[in-house]
Amino acid sequence: MNAIECEHLTRTFGRFRAVDDLNLTVPEGSIFALLGANGAGKSTTLKMLLNLLRPTSGTARVLGSESTKFKKDIFRRIGYVTEDQALHDWMTLDQLLDYYRPLYPLWDRAAEKRLRGIFDLPANRPLKKLSRGMRMKSAFLSVLPFRPELLVLDEPFSGLDPQVRDEFIEGLLEVVGSDRPNTVLVSSHDISEVERLADWVGILAEGRLVTAEPLTALQSRFRRIEVVGPNVAGRVPEAPPAAWRHLAVPTENVVQFVHERFGHDSTERELQLIFAGAAVTARNMTLREIFLAHIRRTASSGQEGP
């Protein structure tokens, strides 16, 4: 089952295609990270999913409903927190929560209490007098206790200091780890934080989907390769395999590249045949390194899909 299904989802602003023919599925129960540089189309995509922005063409289904035809009950099943979250600034946190509780029949007072303990927020200070980090935690606290089936987070870590980020993630894990199925879609360019959470990753570049797959699969197939040996540069094929990316030859005795299909059975045998007798090192790559490799590939080869 999928919590989200997009088919040819497109949004233009004049001649600018912010999101271009997006086909994307977000599996139910996943923590799905949508990654991309600033301007890649992440926020525009999320706004179309939540019917905050109408697509120019294509469709999106969220929790089984077409996004442009949402009924009011669907919003009780979706939580949304964004970096520029609008709050009732004149309210205190107590007043804000008192306001929200009656709107959500499934509001969990026990979860609210646990989260208040995690976030340690002042109860009776007007929200407009809180720091940015405290305001973000207040927004989060106004969403999590009703246990949304889908939690959508748009750049939630932007501008937060490390301690606040840790508290934010702890609160997120509180709701994800509950006994109620939840799907989380988090859009971010803060890759190190996302790597701690996500089990699925999608990468957007200039409005197009570059890849979408489980994080474990992505990390298992990417390696940074270094080959050291006499004149190994002369053994590089004239047409290197398609899975070799960002080939560099610093000296005639060193060859470096990113291998994006390393998990295949024939990979190591292929390298041994080409570079027989040389020392071949395959290093695991972080999600940040994989992201940058994808972005560089897309930039150098044109708009390349998954």
Image (cartoon, grey):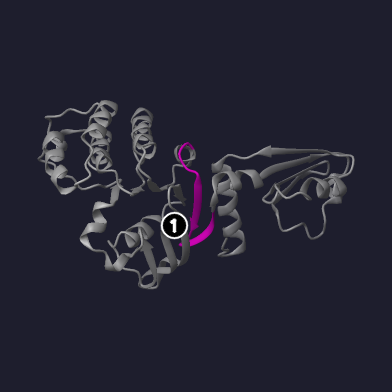
Image position, residue 62 (x, y; %): 36, 60
Residue at x 27% of width, y 47% of height: 84
Q: State the image quarter where residue 94 is shown.
A: top left
Image position, residue 190 (x, y; %): 44, 42
Image position, residue 215 (x, y; %): 55, 45
Image position, residue 79 (x, y; %): 29, 48
Depicted 36 relative to depicted 49: above or below:
above
Q: State the image quarter where residue 171 is shown.
A: top left
Please tell me which residue lies in front, 26 or 84. 26
Q: Residues within 10 Å of mark 1 (few under 14, many from 20)?
A: some
Residue at x 41% of width, y 69% of height: 10
Depicted 213 relative to depicted 126: above or below:
below
214 sits left or right of 268 in the view: left
Q: Is residue 269 visible?
A: yes
Report if residue 210 lies within the magenta region.
yes
Amino acid under disc 1: Asn
Q: Is residue 222 visible?
A: no
Which quarter of the image is occupied by the N terminus?
Answer: bottom left
Please tell me which residue lies in front, 106 or 191. 106
Which residue corresponds to mark 1?
2
Total labels: the figure holds: 1
SS at badge 1:
strand
Q: State the image quarter where residue 71 is shown.
A: bottom left
56 sits left or right of 100 in the view: right
Residue at x 26% of width, y 64% of height: 70
197 sits left or right of 282 in the view: left
Residue at x 85% of width, y 45% of height: 272
In magenta, the rendered stretch is: 196-212
Which quarter of the image is occupied by the C terminus?
Answer: bottom right
Which residue lies most toward the front here?
179
Report if residue 64 lies within the magenta region.
no
